[in-house]
Image (cartoon, rainbow, N blue to C red):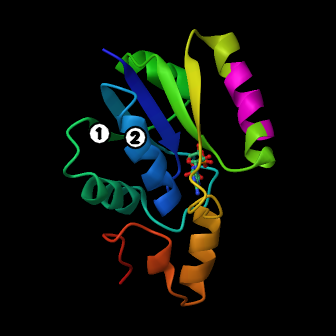
């Protein structure tokens, strides 16, 4: 069984994440979306809300599981018996950042990181830009899956 985790903050989920997850599903038997709990980060959306947005977006995907986790990603991989970490790459800055993390994870464990290049249509999207559009009352719906609605 090929099991991967897709870790992230997903604050909130964007069409970029959605694209990577949809394409990742084809590569693995099970894809666990692992929403990180980092007490030092100031999130816009609560953990419950971030999880709810994910659950709604992938309710029809039996291969996708959504969980939350604390601590090191490699430790969480061991806990759920996942051999792979899936990550998306948008640009050279992502690559440099992800390279250091992937090397570190590889040093700490046998876990392989699998990278997917983002689709050109969604490569410019980031959760931080989406949060900015939301804060300034812009049309965020163009950047997130349909189910993401902010009251
Ligand atoms: P983190 O706080 O771990 O960076 P994010 O929620 O921002 O969490 O991102 C989770 C993963 O999704 C990362 O691998 C990131 O590169 C990827 N990602 C973010 N935005 C996009 C996008 N527009 N297209 C593809 N992948 C993306």
What distance separates the C-alpha of mark 2 from that of mark 1? Answer: 7 Å
Q: Is residue 81 left or right of residue 143?
A: left
Residue 131: within the magenta? no
Residue located 71% across and 29% down the image: 101
Residue placed most toward the observer, 76 or 113: 113
Q: Is residue 62 left or right of residue 8?
A: left
Q: Is residue 127 visible?
A: yes
Q: Is residue 60 left or right of residue 6?
A: left
Circle on res. 120: none
Q: How many marks?
A: 2
Residue placed most toward the observer, 4 or 73: 4
Res. 135 image quadrant: bottom right
Disc 1: CA contacts within 10 A as few (<14), some (14-19) or many (>=20): many
Mark 2 C-beta closer than 8 Å to ligand 1: no
Residue located 30% across and 25% down the image: 29
Percent across and percent down for residue 41 are 62, 54
Residue denoted by label 1: 64
Percent across and percent down for residue 109 are 59, 11
Res. 150 image quadrant: bottom left
Marks 2 and 1, the one that precedes in the sequence: 2
Percent across and percent down for residue 75 are 51, 20
Q: What is the magenta range?
A: 96-104
Residue denoted by label 2: 33
């Amino acid at each position: 069984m090929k099991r991967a985790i897709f870790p992230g903050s997903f604050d909130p989920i964007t069409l970029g994440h959605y694209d990577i997850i949809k394409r990742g599903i084809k590569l693995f038997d099970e894809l666990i979306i692992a929403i990180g709990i980092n007490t030092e980060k100031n999130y816009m959306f609560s953990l419950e809300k971030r999880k709810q947005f994910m659950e709604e977006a992938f309710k029809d995907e039996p291969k996708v599981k959504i969980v939350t986790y604390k601590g090191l990603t490699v430790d969480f991989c061991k806990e759920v018996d996942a051999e792979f970490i899936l990550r998306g790459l948008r640009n050279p800055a992502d690559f440099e950042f992800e390279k250091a993390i992937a090397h570190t994870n590889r040093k700490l464990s046998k876990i392989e990181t699998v990278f997917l290049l983002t689709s050109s249509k969604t490569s410019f999207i980031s959760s931080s830009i989406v949060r900015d559009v939301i804060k300034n009352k812009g049309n965020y719906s163009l950047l997130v899956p349909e189910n993401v609605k902010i009251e």
